Image: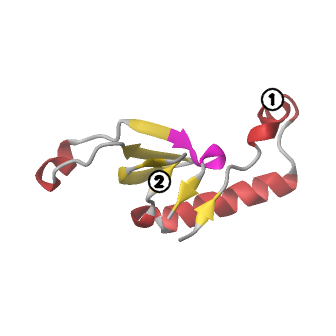
Amino acid sequence: MKDLKAIGIENQINDALFGPSDNQIKLVKQKIDFVKRNASKVIKVNGDKVYDVIIDEDNIRYNLLKCPAEFIQFMKQKYYYPIQYAHIEF
């Protein structure tokens, strides 16, 4: 099981005011790319079991309740969270 911690959550205000460091930008891109490649393996986001995971640019979208397979094409993911700040378990 892989566990991706939040990146820069403790610096959110400074990042908004002054911009993130080059290293933080690099780490966030790596995390987003990894999650995009492994979206089907995501088990939990911020400690909650998730279903129907998709990646929308730099957000992870998901449901907290399992959707029956026959309805999945009609369901939109109800919850989302920025990948950068999410604690994601695979």
Q: Position of residue 21 (x, y in %)?
A: 87, 48
- Asked whether 83 falls inside the magenta stretch, the response is yes
Amino acid type, residue under disc 2 in the picture: Lys
From the viewer's side, name the closer residue of 12 and 73: 12
The magenta-colored residue range is 81-86
Q: Quadrant of residue 19?
A: top right
Q: Residue at x 50, y 68 (%)?
A: 37
Camera-side residue of 90 and 8: 90
The residue indicated by pointer 2 is 44
**Which residue lies most toward the bottom here?**
1
- Tell which of 25 and 87 is nearer to you: 87
Q: Residue at x 43, y 59 (%)?
A: 43
Element marked by disc 2: strand
Amino acid bearing label 1:
Ile
- Residue 38 vertical position relative to residue 72 in the rendered view, above or below: below
Left or right relative to 66: residue 35:
right
Of badges 2 and 1, the one in the foreground is 2
Which coloring applies here?
Answer: secondary structure
Numbered label tally: 2
> Mark 2 and 1 residues: CB-CB less than 8 Å, in contact?
no
Q: Which mark is residue 31?
A: none
Residue at figure coordinates x 73%, y 50% from the top left: 7
Name the residue carrying label 1: 13
Cα distance in 3D space between marks 2 and 1 = 26 Å
Tell me, yes or no, whether the highlighted magenta stretch contains residue 5.
no
Q: Position of residue 11 (x, y in %)?
A: 82, 38
State the residue at coordinates (77%, 53%).
Answer: 25
Residue 53, image x and y in percent? 39, 53
Dot 1 alpha-carbon crowd within 10 angstroms: few under 14, some 14 to 19, many 20 or more? few
